Amino acid sequence: MTSGRPPTLDDVARAAGVHKATASRALNPATRHQVSARTAHRVSLEATRLGYVPNTLARGLRTSRTAAVGVLIPDLTNPLFPPIVRGIQDRLEQQGYTALLVNTDADEARERAEFDALRSRRVEGFIVATARRHHPLLELAVRERITFVTVNRFTELPDVPAVLGDDADGIAQAVAHLRGLGHTRLAHLAGPQTLSTGHVRMRAFRAAAPGAAVVECASYTEAAGYDAARLLFERHPHTTAVLAGNDLIALGTLRAIEGLGRCCPADVSVVGFNDMPFADRFRPPLTTVHVPHHLMGVQAAQLLLDHLRAAAPPWSILLPARLVVRGSTARRRPGPT
Amino acid sequence: MTSGRPPTLDDVARAAGVHKATASRALNPATRHQVSARTAHRVSLEATRLGYVPNTLARGLRTSRTAAVGVLIPDLTNPLFPPIVRGIQDRLEQQGYTALLVNTDADEARERAEFDALRSRRVEGFIVATARRHHPLLELAVRERITFVTVNRFTELPDVPAVLGDDADGIAQAVAHLRGLGHTRLAHLAGPQTLSTGHVRMRAFRAAAPGAAVVECASYTEAAGYDAARLLFERHPHTTAVLAGNDLIALGTLRAIEGLGRCCPADVSVVGFNDMPFADRFRPPLTTVHVPHHLMGVQAAQLLLDHLRAAAPPWSILLPARLVVRGSTARRRPGPT
DNA sequence: CTCACCCATGCGATCGATTGCGGGGGAGTC
DNA sequence: GACTCCCCCGCAATCGATCGCATGGGTGAG
């Protein structure tokens, strides 16, 4: 009755009085028809009675299909990623797959180590949220014919499927919104230009607001946003509207504005990007560009699964972004000029 | 030069002109001393040249050590969990372990399915953040001698190690704080009593404020907090201070207060629990009890690893909680009475 | 010179499940 | 009654790495 060690397929087979090969066929839905209904029933009965759970390692070793995929993200505590990861997990789970999640902290060596660890676990493919525009590791992955898709960001390599938000359109909406409120002195606190999101959003901003001020942040963090905002207001004190590279940068900008004794949105309007969770509860509630992150994760997982099953064309998917107007933007106040 | 399929240990051994057993010993730090330095060097050279990465499945099958642990959480998008998970991952990674993360959404059937899936992957143990006070699945796990620890919550079973925050003390601090501000009509919006956190916090509240109003929320969500707060103010309109079961309930309470045309903190003070990320950026900034969630994850992972290596005593760990005073609590305004 | 000992390495079984191949037996047909 | 065909099922190889055991050659001591 008590199990010394977990029961094996052989145990089940013996209990049912058949060979383990028969038991294997009986338990696998795809091969059950090769077995008489009577024995199939008897085997599954014994299986549940013994609490049999198949050994995925052994199966994976034999079939070289592990039903696992690696997921590379920079940092789970960045609020951008939980919804994406959740979307990935939801879709993968539906198909019986498991996500192996690792954080890289934007550290190349660490990413490489984690990548190898995942390969050693024989994941069938990767979902990469850490992509940089130029990314040696991903070049290697392409050379080794490893199946992967990028999510949220892309890499400058041909034929790599990606699931992206329509960042350029989101920026265009934000600029139009600010213009509509009467702002003429716009500025952009750009994300790192090594990342596709930083690059695309900045180019979109430049296209929509030629000649406007742009300061690049060292990273997508509140601290970097704060520093960049201080620099911006030093160089361009008359700025009345800031389009931040993402919500964390916007948060840093808000802090900088407060530190300068100014007020958002009365003196300066701020727009974020991503619509991170609880952005509506901030002070002030953040006007920001919403990107469907959960859906993004779902689509990335689906895209990867498609490529795993058959050599699907290297499609990419562009998800619509949508400006959400809240309390951090307001009509430009006629200046003291 | 190009690899049809990933190189195996046998490939490396052949390239180095030795037997695969020798190659195995050369590559494993623990057995390298059994091999001459010359061959060890030659083998590792060939291994890196061929891009060899060991097959964890095969190794795990043979050794029945997979260096993987299962992590059960309710929902990754609940901001409570990313820091905990991150702490777990950080510690596990240090030891070469990998976390297999699944969401249960508080659904018993789903939890069971995920649990079995993880067992099928032969995880060596579990870290459980979904524990309920009475939990059939965990009873089963104990019977089957599966190694696991619970984190953040505990289950009413003997000898199950747990890593917990000192919730009772946190509540005591919060009540003392509110009393110090002159509040006498306190109320508690308790979390679900099926969870140890809900139960412990409510008992601590009852002990610190005998006779004060208590309403139980259906779940730890903003929506449930909103509903419970409405009910509370209907029954006890003179309440001037609310101690919420967690930050999400507090957020729902804030919304209810606003909906009633009252103001926090001028009319009603609110205290949350957990100090979730960005709680300081809310409107108003949330006074709440800080619990060291990242550390909690680290300790849980460490505790599990200890139990995996040797049969450590079923220690539990209590981490200190600390009230963080922000803008959602204020001195009681002399009422119109 | 011989014997004992040890170090470095090879051999082969093993972990647990899958799968191609082949065989036994029952049913159906002429 | 004999033959064919098909359905079930068993046999054994296989995936890749680990490890107990055996072995060969070299060294040091007597």
Image (spheres, coloured by chain):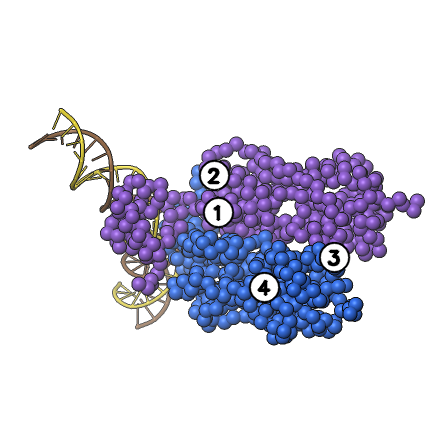
Chain colours: A purple, B blue, C yellow, D brown
Lateral position of residue B130 relative to residue A79, left or right:
left
- The relative height of residue B88 versus residue C11 in the rendered view (above or below) is below
| Residue found 70% across the figure and 67% down from its top | B239
Q: Which residue is mark 4?
A: B216
- The relative height of residue A303 versus residue A107 in the rendered view (above or below) is above
Q: Which residue is mark 3?
A: B261
Figure quadrant of residue A283:
bottom right
Q: Secondary structure at mark 1?
A: helix
Spatial CA distance of label 4 from label 3 is 23 Å
Q: Position of residue A60 (x, y in %)?
A: 40, 47
Q: Nearer the viewer, mark 4 or mark 1?
A: 4
State which chain disc 3 sits on: B
Earlier-in-chain disc, 1 versus 2: 1
| Residue found 44% across the figure and 38% down from its top | B4
- Mark 3–mark 2 contact, CB under 8 Å? no
| Residue found 57% across the figure and 44% down from its top | A297
Amino acid type indicated by mark 4: Glu
Amino acid type indicated by mark 2: Leu
For the C terminus of chain B, the image quarter is bottom right
Spatial CA distance of label 4 from label 1 is 33 Å
Q: Which residue is mark 1?
A: A93
Amino acid type indicated by mark 3: Gly
Amino acid type indicated by mark 1: Glu
| Marks 2 and 4 share the same chain | no
Spatial CA distance of label 1 from label 2 is 15 Å
Q: Secondary structure at mark 4?
A: strand
Q: Position of residue B172 (x, y in %)?
A: 64, 73
